[in-house]
Image (cartoon, helix red, strand yellow):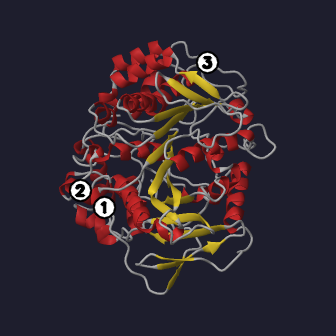
Amino acid sequence: MSPTTVKRALQLTLSTLLSFTAALDPRADLGYAIYEGTSLSNGVNQFLGMRYAAPPLGQNRFRLPSPPSNETGIVQAKEHGSICYGVEKLAFSSVPLPLSEDCLFIDVYAPAQANTTDKAGLPVMLWLQGGAFVQLFNPNYNGTGLVEASQDNVVVVSFNYRVGPYGFLASEELQAENNLNLGLHDQRAAMRWVQQHIRQFGGDPNQVTLFGTSIGGGSVLLQTLAYGGDPPLEAAVSWKAGIAASVYMPPVREVPDLQFQYDQLLNATNCTNLACLRSLDSASFQAANIGRPSPGESAVPLFPYGPVIDGSLLTDTPLQMLRAGKFNHTRPLILGSSHTEGTIFVPQANTTADIASFLQLQFPDLTDRDIQKANDLYATTPSTLPGVTTPESPLYYQLAEMYGDAAFACPTLEFAAGLSEAGVPIHLFRDQILDAVEVAAGYIVPHTWEVQAVWGPEFATSYVALTGADSYDEGEANHAMVSVVQDYWMGFVRSLGDPNALKSWGAPAWLPYGNGMRLKLKTNATMMESVLAVEFQKCDFWTGVSRRTYI
């Protein structure tokens, strides 16, 4: 763990505790349990580790989430619940907390002055974590900073959901039970919990904005696609707007394509059927939960688990559902990407064979002809960039741009265009906030770099922040961007769709996406700009091969 990460972790711990309580600790009666949280000295009521679903243990492993059981007495909600197990050797978290299969917990940060009896409650920000569906980071984000930034005018909620095989295992057996895409169903269970209980914390269930980064941002879009935008009554959840930053859009494949993962788990656990997998204790199952190569491969892809086409929640790949108009048409969205999304993910590349090896590991159905076309299209990518002091291989930035476009920037741009054409209010941004340390290391503006500007640097731990990459801190080069970003976000949340409603003095008006316009976020240079023609050209290529990338 780097010194910067340690500092962030300590800041988060301190901000969580805030030294002592300022009043009697608050309680919330949710019907199934009475939770006692913590009244912090900054006027925020904090409730941690509340159950929003029953423990997914034993026979509930690999099943849809079910409501939490009744609890007697006063239940303490003063510490985070355990984090959901990630995929071994792929998962990490910069804040040490217990890991467990019993992990479906939710946290609420609310102004102490919020009225819990008035129907006119506060807007709610519901955070969808990132982690590529192989890991989680929930305690890295402390909602007290956003409550403060809103001047006590929002309620912030975060939660865990199942990842890896616990949340995204696919097989014919699970399909027969209708137990697919469990991590996405966990997200919907948390949304349903907010609908039922957020008034007890002063929130308004009719003013919920989803927000997330990385696969959290991708989840905002997947939930926009859910059930083709028209869920059956028993599956319906209510949210009014969404913010999807640094969007990662995962491949969404057919169940038979991923049966091998289930079969490999059977083999690794000496099981022969689903009942046996459910009978294993958590430690035994987790010991077998490692990333494994696809058939015919020797290496493991970056993110081996993800959603599948299940015929109900997801009826096709994301871009195919978008093209078919199978999405919610009423919810305004902010969408955005970092300037160099791929730099933290790709290896060094000296030859086009290195490029082909990496891309075909992530997208096995890409043909050699596809790779050749991509190399031709990206041939002018520079081998180094201004300010970089770390030696990079000749084709590193070419590969980084390719993968960054394929999995992050181009799906975001395609969704912005498709949703906007359908009449959905869309605001698009590109994060170009430069940190000298990140630039020198060659990452430039890495994936999810905006997260500390959104939450506030002392309230979020960024796993991409290198030692000394603290330019969002007070007195540092990018500190002014924290209020700029937070004011756009807060305006959007509190108005349910207008990022200009509370924008910072001097900040430009953020125009809707329209004819390829987006907001460039950059210190002392935030402005509207047009998406470049070459970006559209490259994205047209990735859209054209999306049937082979399953995006």
Task: Point out the tag, 1 or 2, that comes first from the N-terminus.
Answer: 1
Q: Nearer the viewer, residue 38 or 206?
A: 206
Task: Provide the residue designation for mark 1.
Answer: 62
Q: Residue furthest bottom?
A: 73
| Labelled pair 1, 2 in contact (Cβ < 8 Å) | yes
Left or right: 330, with 73 as reference point: left
User: Circle 1: is it few (<14), some (14-19), or many (20+) Cα within 10 Å?
Assistant: many
Left or right: 363, with 445 as reference point: left
Tell me the amino acid under the disc marked 1. Answer: Phe
Q: Nearer the viewer, residue 520 or 255?
A: 520
Q: Residue furthest left?
A: 176
Task: For residue 500, say whether it is visible.
Answer: yes
User: Circle 3: is it few (<14), some (14-19), or many (20+) Cα within 10 Å?
Assistant: few
Task: Provide the residue designation for mark 2.
Answer: 174
Whether residue 281 is situated above or below residue 424 in the rendered picture = below
Whether residue 9 is situated above or below residue 331 in the rendered picture = below
Which numbered circle lies on residue 489? none
Task: For residue 341, say whether it is visible.
Answer: no
Q: Position of residue 15 (x, y in %)?
A: 70, 62
Residue 278: image quadrant is bottom left
Residue 358: image quadrant is top left
Q: Secondary structure at mark 2?
A: helix
Q: Position of residue 107 (x, y in %)?
A: 53, 65
Task: Point out the tag, 3 or 2, that comes first from the N-terminus.
Answer: 2
Left or right: 230, with 505 as reference point: left
Tell me the amino acid under the disc marked 2. Answer: Leu
Left or right: 305, with 204 as reference point: left
The Cα–Cα distance between marks 3 and 2, rounded to whole angstroms, is: 46 Å
Task: Provide the residue designation for mark 3.
Answer: 383
